[in-house]
Image (cartoon, rainbow, N blue to C red):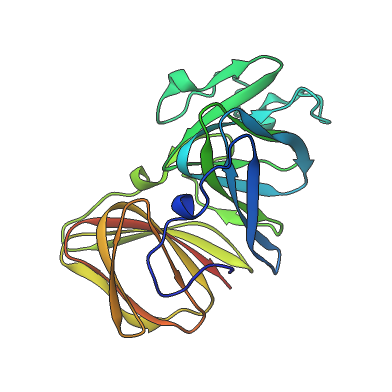
Amino acid sequence: MKLPAGKVFSISDDMPPVSGCTTSQTIHHANGLSITNFSLAAHTDISAECYDYHKLFVVEWGDMEVYQGSADPTGLADPAGFAGQDGSTDFAGPNDPARHHVRGPARALAVASGEAVVSLPDVTLGVRTDAGCVYTEVTLKKEAAMNDTLKSGEVVKLADLLPYQDGRVVNMDLARNDGMKLSLMSFGAGTGLDEHSAPGEALVFALDGEGVIGYEGQEHVIHAGENFKFDKGGRHFVRADRPFKMALLLTL
Protein backbone atom coordinates (compact mmCIF):
# COMPACT_ATOMS: atom_id res chain seq x y z
CA MET A 1 0.00 0.00 0.00
CA LYS A 2 1.20 3.47 -0.83
CA LEU A 3 0.71 4.73 2.72
CA PRO A 4 3.16 5.43 5.56
CA ALA A 5 3.65 2.50 7.95
CA GLY A 6 4.26 2.78 11.65
CA LYS A 7 2.53 6.07 12.44
CA VAL A 8 -0.97 7.40 13.07
CA PHE A 9 -2.41 9.40 10.19
CA SER A 10 -5.74 10.40 8.71
CA ILE A 11 -6.77 9.66 5.14
CA SER A 12 -9.16 12.61 5.21
CA ASP A 13 -6.52 15.03 6.57
CA ASP A 14 -3.97 13.84 4.01
CA MET A 15 -6.40 14.31 1.09
CA PRO A 16 -8.28 17.58 1.68
CA PRO A 17 -10.63 18.47 -1.18
CA VAL A 18 -9.28 20.78 -3.88
CA SER A 19 -11.85 23.44 -4.78
CA GLY A 20 -13.86 22.45 -7.83
CA CYS A 21 -11.93 19.19 -8.30
CA THR A 22 -12.05 15.48 -7.67
CA THR A 23 -8.82 13.79 -6.54
CA SER A 24 -7.98 10.10 -6.39
CA GLN A 25 -5.03 8.00 -5.25
CA THR A 26 -4.79 4.24 -5.76
CA ILE A 27 -2.93 2.88 -2.74
CA HIS A 28 -3.08 -0.82 -3.61
CA HIS A 29 -3.65 -2.80 -6.80
CA ALA A 30 -2.77 -6.50 -6.80
CA ASN A 31 -4.29 -9.98 -6.75
CA GLY A 32 -7.77 -8.88 -7.75
CA LEU A 33 -7.97 -6.15 -5.10
CA SER A 34 -7.87 -2.42 -5.71
CA ILE A 35 -8.02 0.23 -2.96
CA THR A 36 -8.42 3.88 -3.96
CA ASN A 37 -8.91 7.00 -1.84
CA PHE A 38 -11.10 9.75 -3.29
CA SER A 39 -11.44 13.39 -2.28
CA LEU A 40 -14.36 15.33 -3.77
CA ALA A 41 -14.86 19.07 -3.42
CA ALA A 42 -18.33 20.51 -2.87
CA HIS A 43 -20.69 20.15 -5.84
CA THR A 44 -18.52 17.64 -7.71
CA ASP A 45 -19.15 14.07 -8.79
CA ILE A 46 -17.70 10.87 -10.20
CA SER A 47 -19.66 10.00 -13.35
CA ALA A 48 -21.82 6.89 -13.28
CA GLU A 49 -20.10 3.82 -14.73
CA CYS A 50 -20.81 0.10 -14.83
CA TYR A 51 -18.45 -2.61 -13.54
CA ASP A 52 -18.78 -6.38 -13.33
CA TYR A 53 -17.67 -6.62 -9.70
CA HIS A 54 -18.60 -5.45 -6.21
CA LYS A 55 -17.41 -2.15 -4.77
CA LEU A 56 -17.29 -1.16 -1.12
CA PHE A 57 -17.50 2.56 -0.32
CA VAL A 58 -16.32 3.75 3.12
CA VAL A 59 -16.72 7.46 3.94
CA GLU A 60 -14.03 9.01 6.14
CA TRP A 61 -15.21 12.62 6.06
CA GLY A 62 -18.22 14.58 4.83
CA ASP A 63 -21.16 12.99 3.08
CA MET A 64 -22.03 11.83 -0.42
CA GLU A 65 -24.62 10.07 -2.52
CA VAL A 66 -24.02 6.85 -4.40
CA TYR A 67 -26.52 7.01 -7.22
CA GLN A 68 -27.78 4.56 -9.79
CA GLY A 69 -27.90 6.20 -13.21
CA SER A 70 -30.94 6.01 -15.46
CA ALA A 71 -28.60 4.79 -18.21
CA ASP A 72 -28.15 1.49 -16.38
CA PRO A 73 -27.56 -1.12 -19.10
CA THR A 74 -29.68 -3.57 -17.11
CA GLY A 75 -32.59 -1.22 -17.81
CA LEU A 76 -33.59 -0.91 -14.15
CA ALA A 77 -36.04 -3.71 -14.86
CA ASP A 78 -34.72 -5.37 -11.73
CA PRO A 79 -34.80 -2.74 -8.98
CA ALA A 80 -33.09 -5.18 -6.63
CA GLY A 81 -29.90 -4.47 -8.56
CA PHE A 82 -29.22 -1.65 -6.14
CA ALA A 83 -32.18 -1.07 -3.87
CA GLY A 84 -33.31 -4.30 -2.29
CA GLN A 85 -35.00 -7.60 -2.85
CA ASP A 86 -38.46 -6.04 -2.58
CA GLY A 87 -37.72 -3.56 -5.36
CA SER A 88 -38.21 -0.60 -3.05
CA THR A 89 -36.64 2.69 -4.08
CA ASP A 90 -36.90 4.47 -0.74
CA PHE A 91 -33.69 2.79 0.47
CA ALA A 92 -34.91 2.28 4.02
CA GLY A 93 -31.71 1.50 5.87
CA PRO A 94 -30.61 1.01 9.47
CA ASN A 95 -29.41 4.56 10.06
CA ASP A 96 -31.65 7.34 8.80
CA PRO A 97 -34.33 6.25 6.31
CA ALA A 98 -35.26 9.87 5.61
CA ARG A 99 -31.88 10.37 3.93
CA HIS A 100 -32.39 7.51 1.46
CA HIS A 101 -34.34 8.79 -1.46
CA VAL A 102 -34.93 9.20 -5.18
CA ARG A 103 -33.47 12.33 -6.75
CA GLY A 104 -34.09 13.25 -10.39
CA PRO A 105 -33.59 10.49 -12.96
CA ALA A 106 -31.41 8.41 -10.65
CA ARG A 107 -31.97 6.65 -7.36
CA ALA A 108 -29.49 7.55 -4.64
CA LEU A 109 -28.18 6.43 -1.27
CA ALA A 110 -26.86 9.03 1.17
CA VAL A 111 -23.68 7.88 2.93
CA ALA A 112 -22.11 9.91 5.75
CA SER A 113 -18.82 9.80 7.62
CA GLY A 114 -18.31 6.45 9.35
CA GLU A 115 -20.80 4.73 7.08
CA ALA A 116 -20.33 2.25 4.24
CA VAL A 117 -22.28 0.68 1.39
CA VAL A 118 -21.63 -2.20 -1.03
CA SER A 119 -22.75 -2.14 -4.65
CA LEU A 120 -23.75 -5.07 -6.81
CA PRO A 121 -21.90 -5.77 -10.07
CA ASP A 122 -23.32 -4.84 -13.49
CA VAL A 123 -25.12 -1.75 -12.17
CA THR A 124 -24.32 1.78 -13.35
CA LEU A 125 -23.25 3.80 -10.30
CA GLY A 126 -21.78 7.23 -9.66
CA VAL A 127 -20.87 9.36 -6.65
CA ARG A 128 -21.82 12.99 -6.01
CA THR A 129 -21.55 15.38 -3.10
CA ASP A 130 -23.00 18.75 -2.18
CA ALA A 131 -20.68 19.65 0.69
CA GLY A 132 -17.57 17.59 -0.10
CA CYS A 133 -16.30 14.21 1.07
CA VAL A 134 -13.33 11.87 1.38
CA TYR A 135 -13.93 8.15 0.94
CA THR A 136 -12.17 4.87 0.28
CA GLU A 137 -13.30 2.58 -2.52
CA VAL A 138 -12.45 -1.12 -2.22
CA THR A 139 -12.88 -3.01 -5.49
CA LEU A 140 -13.45 -6.74 -5.12
CA LYS A 141 -12.54 -8.08 -8.55
CA LYS A 142 -12.63 -11.65 -7.31
CA GLU A 143 -15.69 -13.29 -5.80
CA ALA A 144 -15.87 -12.52 -2.09
CA ALA A 145 -17.72 -14.15 0.77
CA MET A 146 -19.65 -11.47 2.67
CA ASN A 147 -21.16 -11.41 6.13
CA ASP A 148 -24.96 -11.31 6.18
CA THR A 149 -24.81 -7.94 7.96
CA LEU A 150 -23.22 -6.40 4.85
CA LYS A 151 -25.99 -6.33 2.23
CA SER A 152 -25.66 -4.67 -1.15
CA GLY A 153 -27.58 -1.41 -1.33
CA GLU A 154 -27.89 -0.91 2.43
CA VAL A 155 -26.01 1.85 4.23
CA VAL A 156 -24.39 0.64 7.44
CA LYS A 157 -22.53 2.42 10.22
CA LEU A 158 -19.49 0.23 10.69
CA ALA A 159 -19.07 0.96 14.40
CA ASP A 160 -22.64 -0.20 15.08
CA LEU A 161 -22.29 -3.61 13.44
CA LEU A 162 -20.77 -5.29 16.48
CA PRO A 163 -21.15 -4.69 20.23
CA TYR A 164 -18.77 -4.09 23.08
CA GLN A 165 -18.50 -6.86 25.66
CA ASP A 166 -16.83 -6.33 29.03
CA GLY A 167 -13.46 -8.02 29.21
CA ARG A 168 -13.74 -9.45 25.70
CA VAL A 169 -12.57 -8.90 22.13
CA VAL A 170 -15.33 -9.32 19.54
CA ASN A 171 -14.38 -10.00 15.90
CA MET A 172 -16.58 -9.94 12.81
CA ASP A 173 -15.32 -10.86 9.33
CA LEU A 174 -17.21 -8.65 6.85
CA ALA A 175 -15.75 -9.78 3.51
CA ARG A 176 -13.04 -12.10 2.27
CA ASN A 177 -11.54 -13.49 -0.90
CA ASP A 178 -8.11 -14.89 -1.74
CA GLY A 179 -6.68 -11.36 -2.01
CA MET A 180 -8.11 -9.60 1.04
CA LYS A 181 -9.93 -9.79 4.34
CA LEU A 182 -12.03 -7.03 5.92
CA SER A 183 -12.79 -7.42 9.61
CA LEU A 184 -14.29 -5.41 12.45
CA MET A 185 -13.05 -5.68 16.03
CA SER A 186 -14.32 -4.30 19.33
CA PHE A 187 -12.18 -4.27 22.44
CA GLY A 188 -13.61 -4.03 25.92
CA ALA A 189 -11.59 -1.89 28.33
CA GLY A 190 -8.49 -3.74 29.48
CA THR A 191 -8.35 -6.14 26.52
CA GLY A 192 -6.12 -6.33 23.46
CA LEU A 193 -4.16 -8.50 21.05
CA ASP A 194 -0.74 -9.90 21.85
CA GLU A 195 2.19 -8.95 19.64
CA HIS A 196 2.22 -10.78 16.32
CA SER A 197 3.15 -10.28 12.66
CA ALA A 198 0.74 -9.49 9.84
CA PRO A 199 0.73 -12.01 6.95
CA GLY A 200 0.25 -9.10 4.54
CA GLU A 201 -0.08 -5.33 4.58
CA ALA A 202 -2.93 -4.07 6.73
CA LEU A 203 -4.82 -0.80 7.06
CA VAL A 204 -6.59 0.14 10.30
CA PHE A 205 -9.66 2.40 10.39
CA ALA A 206 -10.32 3.51 13.98
CA LEU A 207 -14.11 3.63 14.36
CA ASP A 208 -14.87 4.42 17.99
CA GLY A 209 -13.04 5.31 21.17
CA GLU A 210 -9.30 5.23 21.68
CA GLY A 211 -6.73 2.45 21.37
CA VAL A 212 -2.99 1.91 21.60
CA ILE A 213 -1.13 0.27 18.73
CA GLY A 214 2.33 -1.05 19.38
CA TYR A 215 4.42 -1.30 16.23
CA GLU A 216 8.05 -2.36 16.01
CA GLY A 217 8.77 -1.37 19.60
CA GLN A 218 6.89 1.94 19.71
CA GLU A 219 3.41 2.72 21.05
CA HIS A 220 0.94 4.95 19.19
CA VAL A 221 -2.40 6.25 20.50
CA ILE A 222 -5.12 6.16 17.85
CA HIS A 223 -8.57 7.78 17.95
CA ALA A 224 -11.79 7.37 15.99
CA GLY A 225 -11.37 8.77 12.48
CA GLU A 226 -7.65 8.01 12.31
CA ASN A 227 -5.70 5.34 10.44
CA PHE A 228 -2.63 3.16 10.87
CA LYS A 229 -0.80 0.90 8.42
CA PHE A 230 1.18 -2.28 9.09
CA ASP A 231 3.77 -3.50 6.64
CA LYS A 232 3.86 -7.21 5.86
CA GLY A 233 5.67 -8.93 8.71
CA GLY A 234 5.50 -5.86 10.94
CA ARG A 235 5.43 -6.78 14.63
CA HIS A 236 2.45 -5.15 16.34
CA PHE A 237 -0.06 -5.39 19.17
CA VAL A 238 -3.31 -3.65 20.11
CA ARG A 239 -4.23 -2.53 23.63
CA ALA A 240 -7.50 -0.99 24.71
CA ASP A 241 -7.26 0.85 28.02
CA ARG A 242 -10.83 1.98 27.31
CA PRO A 243 -13.46 0.67 24.83
CA PHE A 244 -12.19 0.77 21.24
CA LYS A 245 -13.49 -0.35 17.83
CA MET A 246 -11.64 -0.62 14.54
CA ALA A 247 -11.90 -2.01 11.03
CA LEU A 248 -8.94 -3.92 9.58
CA LEU A 249 -8.36 -4.30 5.83
CA LEU A 250 -5.75 -7.00 5.30
CA THR A 251 -4.13 -7.93 1.99
CA LEU A 252 -3.39 -11.64 1.53
Quarter where residue 240 is shown: bottom left
Where 14 sits versus 46, above or below? below
Asked if residue 81 lies left or right of residue 246, the reply is: right
Q: Quadrant of the N terminus?
A: bottom right
Asked if residue 128 lies left or right of residue 154, the reply is: right
Q: Which of 177 and 62 is in front in this view?
A: 62
- Residue under the point 49% across and 55% down: 14
- Residue under the point 41% across and 46% down: 158
Where is residue 64 drawn, in percent x and y? 54, 32
Where 216 sits versus 177, above or below? below
- Residue under the point 62% across and 16% down: 103
Where is residue 173 drawn, in percent x and y? 46, 59
Where is residue 9 drawn, in percent x and y? 41, 61
Q: How many labels does the image show?
A: 0
Asked if residue 147 lies left or right of residue 206, the reply is: right
Where is residue 59 drawn, in percent x and y? 49, 43
Q: Residue furthest top?
A: 104
Q: In which quarter of the image is the C terminus?
A: bottom right
Q: Which of 204 and 3 is in front in this view?
A: 3
Q: Residue furthest front?
A: 19
- Residue under the point 36% across and 57% down: 246
Where 17 sits versus 98, above or below? below
